[in-house]
Image: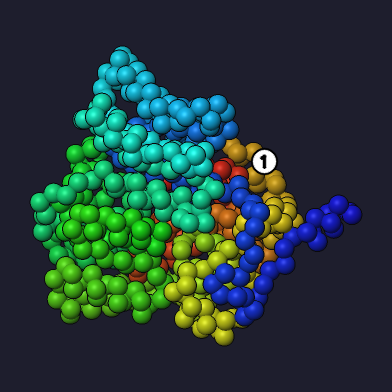
């Protein structure tokens, strides 16, 4: 009893939306990482390049995580490593060790009876130790390129200690496209870039591209290195995530491409403007784009109404791993009759301010929680949201079939004592099996995304999931051996 009370008192107190300091409401210090593994890491992202091989050069403790990621993806044959030793920090041979280690790995790959073929692209990941010592990465890749002129060597970084300057995700987005070279432009191609997940071909972006008669390049559709390199022929590149901004700016300048930044907004004014801008670049008639928006928005709002009627007053929690603009999403849902009660994010995009100001008036009592604060490690164990039984009975046995919604809820009041989460972290912190399992927008975009999200909310509300089994998989959408 005393222990439980002590733990409960150590859980961070949420801040009402009306009181938060936008856009960074929480102190940033020692960080906690909730065991929701759906977000992608640098290993997953690097695997998107066909016929590539990853080589990590770092200390053995750091190697453990990346190796396990590749193993869980069933892609260990595409990863190798060079373990750093303490003496490498002072013997003056840091660059030499990277070069010799990489050469040894490549020669073994070429002579292996299983492969007998060199990779087309090698991603070399240096670590914090190299940055501390001032390692000359350019010299390393130059020398390796002379040894192996048929291989593209790409500089990558595994340096979480440097995240104050640029996040590992943003740095990896740059590396992901660095091997692409300029090519004669094809007016019939549009490239969808910056996302780990494949773009939903039913999304508003893809629908307008199809209306223009142009083809779509998406790295997730590439099965060969040559297809990957075709990105250099695209005159227009489109990104929908701000984490890819640095990569898109660099690539568009290097490859002489027009970059369209169409972020994953839920503010309908911004969304409409994005679609009109896209239509203009695709040389579509404005009336045709207007008609599409009218039909797509009508379908989306119809789906929202249906979901609102089904969920009624069910409390809804949203976290930042599901969608980048969760304040805009919360405002949209609130205006369409949903009961959004909590947001989980350590900060918000600065361009959500207008939506934030409207939402704090519309529903000021929404609770805002951090996800990285160490005290949040007690949140899930103290949650008492689930009705009809102990949540632990749902998650202990990963092979156990989940009961249906009707089996564990009062059918006359389907929203009683039940919380719906959008995102894996919101599900974890609330201990709820009723959640929309989605990361980074799931590849969706626009009004089509709104409609599909409404359908996913109904599905999540009616069909509980096994929390531990689902959110324990690394890399949402990737193959997992678990």
**Residue 312's x, y, as percent?**
57, 73
**Residue 173's x, y, as percent?**
37, 51
Q: Is residue 13 visible?
A: yes
Along the line of sight, which residue is nearer the eye, 27 or 224?
27
Along the line of sight, which residue is nearer the eye, 203 or 408?
203
Dot 1: few (<14), some (14–19), or many (≥20) neighbours within 10 Å?
few
Q: Is residue 170 left or right of residue 231?
A: right
Give the quadrant of residue 430: bottom right
Q: Residue at x 28, y 35 (%)?
A: 142
Q: Residue at x 62, y 75 (%)?
A: 20
- Tag count: 1
- Image height of 59 relative to 44, above or below: above
Q: Is residue 369 visible?
A: no
The colour style of the image is rainbow
**Residue 21's x, y, as percent?**
60, 75
Q: Is residue 362 left or right of residue 251?
A: right
Identify residue for label 1. Answer: 396
Give the quadrant of residue 383: bottom right
Along the line of sight, which residue is nearer the eye, 453 or 233?
233
Q: Quadrant of the N terminus?
A: bottom right
Q: Is residue 21 left or right of residue 379?
A: left
- Image height of 315 relative to 200, above or below: below
Give the quadrant of residue 303: bottom left
Q: Residue at x 72, y 56 (%)?
A: 375
Along the line of sight, which residue is nearer the eye, 263 or 59?
59
- Image height of 115 relative to 164, above or below: above
**Residue 323's x, y, as percent?**
46, 62
Q: Secondary structure at mark 1?
A: loop
Q: Residue at x 52, y 68 (%)?
A: 348
């Amino acid at each position: 009893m005393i222990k439980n009370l002590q733990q409960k008192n150590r859980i961070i107190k949420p801040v009402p939306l009306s009181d938060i300091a936008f856009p960074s409401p929480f102190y940033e210090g020692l960080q906690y990482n909730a065991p929701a593994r759906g977000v992608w890491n640098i290993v997953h992202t690097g695997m998107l390049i066909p016929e590539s091989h990853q080589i990590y050069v770092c200390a053995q403790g750091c190697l453990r995580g990346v190796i396990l990621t590749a193993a869980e993806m069933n892609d260990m044959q595409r990863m190798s490593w060079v373990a750093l030793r303490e003496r490498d920090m002072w013997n003056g041979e840091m660059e030499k060790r990277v070069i010799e280690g990489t050469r040894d790995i490549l020669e073994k790959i070429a002579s292996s009876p299983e492969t007998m073929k060199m990779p087309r692209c090698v991603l070399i990941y240096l670590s914090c130790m190299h940055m501390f010592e001032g390692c000359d990465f350019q010299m390393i890749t130059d020398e390796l390129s002379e040894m192996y002129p048929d291989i593209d060597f790409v500089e990558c970084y595994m340096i979480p200690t440097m995240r104050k300057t640029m996040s590992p995700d943003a740095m990896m987005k740059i590396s992901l496209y660095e091997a692409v070279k300029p090519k004669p432009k094809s007016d019939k191609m549009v490239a969808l870039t910056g996302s780990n997940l494949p773009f939903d071909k039913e999304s508003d972006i893809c629908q307008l591209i199809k209306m223009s008669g142009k083809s779509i390049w998406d790295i997730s559709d590439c099965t060969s290195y040559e297809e990957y390199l075709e990105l250099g022929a695209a005159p227009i590149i489109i990104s929908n995530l701000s984490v890819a901004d640095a990569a898109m700016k660099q690539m568009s300048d290097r490859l002489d491409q027009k970059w369209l930044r169409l972020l994953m907004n839920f503010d309908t004014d911004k969304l409409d403007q994005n679609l009109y801008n896209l239509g203009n670049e695709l040389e579509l008639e404005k009336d045709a784009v207007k008609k599409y928006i009218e039909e797509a928005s009508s379908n989306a709002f119809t789906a929202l109404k249906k979901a609102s009627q089904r969920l009624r007053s069910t409390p809804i929690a949203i976290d930042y791993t599901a969608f980048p603009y969760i304040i805009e999403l919360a405002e949209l849902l609130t205006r369409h009759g949903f009961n959004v009660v909590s947001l989980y994010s350590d900060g918000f995009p600065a361009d959500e301010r207008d939506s934030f100001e409207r939402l704090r008036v519309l529903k000021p009592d929404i609770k805002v929680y951090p996800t990285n604060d160490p005290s949040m490690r007690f949140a899930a164990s103290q949650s008492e949201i689930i009705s009809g039984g102990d949540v632990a009975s749902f998650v202990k046995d990963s092979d156990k079939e989940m009961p249906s919604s009707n089996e564990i809820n009062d059918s006359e009041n389907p929203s009683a004592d039940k919380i719906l989460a959008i995102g894996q972290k919101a599900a974890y912190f609330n201990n709820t099996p009723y959640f929309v399992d989605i990361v980074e927008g799931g590849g969706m975009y626009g009004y089509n995304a709104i409609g599909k999200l409404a359908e996913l909310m109904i599905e999540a509300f009616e069909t509980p999931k096994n929390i531990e089994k689902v959110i324990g998989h690394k890399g949402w959408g990737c193959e997992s051996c678990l």
